[in-house]
Image (cartoon, rainbow, N blue to C red):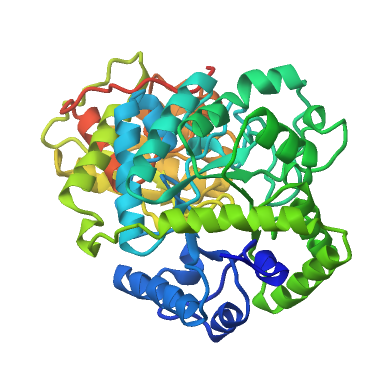
């Protein structure tokens, strides 16, 4: 279809809104007046029941049709693991768990299941998989969202998940180009700098994106990170860099799909009056879709300024039209998507797949004390201590989850007590817990990023010093053992979701073998 310049600009807008049961009046008015590209759904903004979500996406598409506009892209971050926009979907353990299995078949099957469940609620674009190579233990934002530290493994599993996801008719998104794995700060709060030379980036960060492109990925999401070696030595974030988007991604890597930027409300981008200039810079650099997760009252100003810039020649109308054509081509492909019934979400097949991934990913790093498998006496008392999960970054939905390890263990042994600690317990809490744990025959302590939340490590070390029999389990990143090197029995689950807790309990009790292999290097 032929588009006016105004309509072409609108196709580059991805917006979000508050509303769970029905679209807000504000977003309906914008859809009526603008040819927008689509909508991004967020758990805290839009997720009610599954039926409500399906009705919500149907209402959004109906509004676009009534306005005689192309169908909307409707996107969500459904990665599995710690980032699940649709919380009532099957609880797949996540990418690093898949990395521990080394199984392309499982990655394909998980991608296909993710796509089917998204299609059932009317979501046609998944902002997944994460193709970042997590080779920095201090990375606060990627972590278990990555398949691991080996570029070849990350590329293989990314490609498999992409093929599975797109076999369901939903578009996959490889992120965060050109690679967000080797950072020690979060682009939600500022622009991280990766200062490696171009040859090293080409060898480590880029291979998974090459694999994703070869696999036919429909979209690639940019990162708000600075890589001077790819950018003429400047401090421009990748999202606004023509060298990275047009030069590297389009020309050198040959990507012909849709380039979407990470959310423009992240603080690596200007959030004051200059946010419109940031949006213009991204479009000029080659971005096809702007994720404007701002208050909808700011949309009209952004739209008017971008349109005016195009009419005055500050932005190329030809390039805007080329971006709009790529977006429309994606929409045409997704229009063929068939919507499965809601019953596919959490179906027996998908739950069994989640449990299979969890079981094959369970990793026993060491058992120098030969404590496993557990053979407790009938009257033995076991204590389980786990943190109360928090969302450690805006790209996290862990706060919605309560780890159910104690519940899972009670299937095998009746005398299991449960204790919760703060994410970073104070010394007083550590002392109180240590005193309570003295009377138990065995204590299992789960930790979440204990290298950062050192109160958790202090509890493990205090229990060991007290002579308490301890098993430590990293429930998220495997690097935790560096914070309590004296522990003799140490395992990794990569996830706090129910299938992982059930698989861990089965492994500890000797009902299944620990079959996973560490996808990252840990040091004692």
The x and y percentages for residue 295 are 67, 74
- Between 455 and 38, the residue placed more toward the observer is 38
Quadrant (top left/top right/bottom left/bottom right) for the N terminus: bottom right
* Figure quadrant of residue 58: bottom left
Position of 488 compared to 315: left or right?
left
Q: Is residue 332 left or right of residue 115?
A: right
Residue 295 shows in the view: yes
Tell me residue 216's x, y (percent).
47, 36
Q: Residue at x 53, y 34 (%)?
A: 131
Q: Is residue 403 above or below residue 85?
A: above
**In the image, residue 39 above or below residue 333:** below
- Residue at image point 18% right, 45% down: 349
Horizontal side, residue 403 vs residue 296: left or right = left
Give the camera-side residue of 261 and 371.
261
Asked whether residue 443 is in view, the answer is no
Residue in the image at 78% along x and 69% along y: 307
């Amino acid at each position: 279809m032929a588009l006016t310049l105004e309509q072409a600009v609108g196709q580059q807008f991805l917006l979000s809104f508050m509303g769970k049961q029905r679209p807000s009046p504000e977003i309906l008015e914008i859809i009526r007046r603008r040819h927008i590209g689509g909508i991004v759904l967020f758990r805290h903004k839009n997720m009610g029941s599954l039926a409500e979500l399906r009705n919500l996406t149907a209402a959004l598409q109906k509004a676009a049709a009534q306005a005689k506009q192309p169908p909307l892209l409707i996107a969500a971050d459904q990665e599995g693991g710690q980032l699940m926009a649709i919380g009532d979907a099957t609880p797949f353990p996540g990418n690093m768990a898949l990395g521990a299995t080394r199984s392309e078949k499982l990655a394909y099957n998980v991608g296909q299941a993710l796509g089917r469940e998204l299609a059932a609620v009317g979501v046609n674009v998944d902002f997944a998989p994460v193709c970042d190579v997590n080779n920095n233990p201090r990375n606060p934002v990627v972590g278990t969202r990555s398949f691991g530290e080996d570029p070849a493994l990350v590329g293989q599993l990314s490609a498999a998940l992409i093929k599975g996801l797109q076999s369901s008719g939903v578009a996959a998104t490889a992120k965060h180009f050109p690679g967000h794995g080797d950072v020690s700060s979060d682009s939600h709060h500022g622009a991280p700098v990766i200062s490696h030379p171009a040859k090293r980036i080409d060898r480590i960060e880029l291979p998974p994106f090459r694999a994703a492109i070869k696999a036919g990925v429909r979209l690639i999401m940019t990162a708000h990170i600075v890589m001077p070696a790819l950018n003429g030595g400047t401090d421009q974030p990748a999202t606004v860099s023509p060298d990275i988007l047009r030069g590297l991604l389009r020309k050198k890597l040959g990507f012909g799909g849709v380039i979407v930027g990470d959310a423009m409300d992240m603080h690596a981008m200007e959030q004051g009056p200059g946010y419109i200039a940031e949006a213009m810079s991204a479009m000029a650099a080659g971005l096809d879709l702007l994720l404007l997760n701002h208050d909808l009252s700011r949309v009209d100003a952004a739209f008017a300024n971008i349109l005016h810039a195009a009419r005055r020649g500050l932005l190329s109308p030809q390039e805007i039209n080329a971006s709009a054509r790529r977006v429309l081509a994606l929409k045409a492909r997704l229009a063929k998507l068939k919507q499965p019934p809601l019953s596919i979400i959490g179906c027996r097949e998908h739950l069994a797949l989640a449990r299979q991934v969890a079981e094959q990913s369970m990793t026993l790093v060491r058992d120098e004390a030969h404590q496993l498998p557990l053979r407790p006496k009938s009257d033995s008392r076991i204590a389980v201590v786990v943190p109360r999960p928090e969302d450690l970054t805006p790209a996290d939905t862990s706060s919605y989850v309560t780890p159910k390890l104690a519940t899972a263990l009670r299937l095998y042994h009746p005398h299991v007590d449960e204790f919760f600690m703060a994410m970073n317990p104070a010394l007083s809490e550590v002392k109180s817990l240590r005193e309570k744990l003295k009377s138990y025959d065995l204590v299992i302590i789960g930790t979440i990023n204990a290298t950062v939340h050192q109160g958790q490590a202090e509890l493990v070390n205090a229990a060991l010093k007290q002579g308490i029999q301890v098993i430590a389990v990293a429930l998220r990143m495997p690097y935790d053992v560096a914070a309590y090197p004296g522990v003799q029995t140490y395992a990794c689950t990569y996830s706090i979701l129910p299938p992982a807790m059930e698989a861990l309990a089965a492994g500890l009790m000797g009902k299944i073998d620990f079959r996973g292999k560490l996808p990252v290097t840990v040091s004692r």
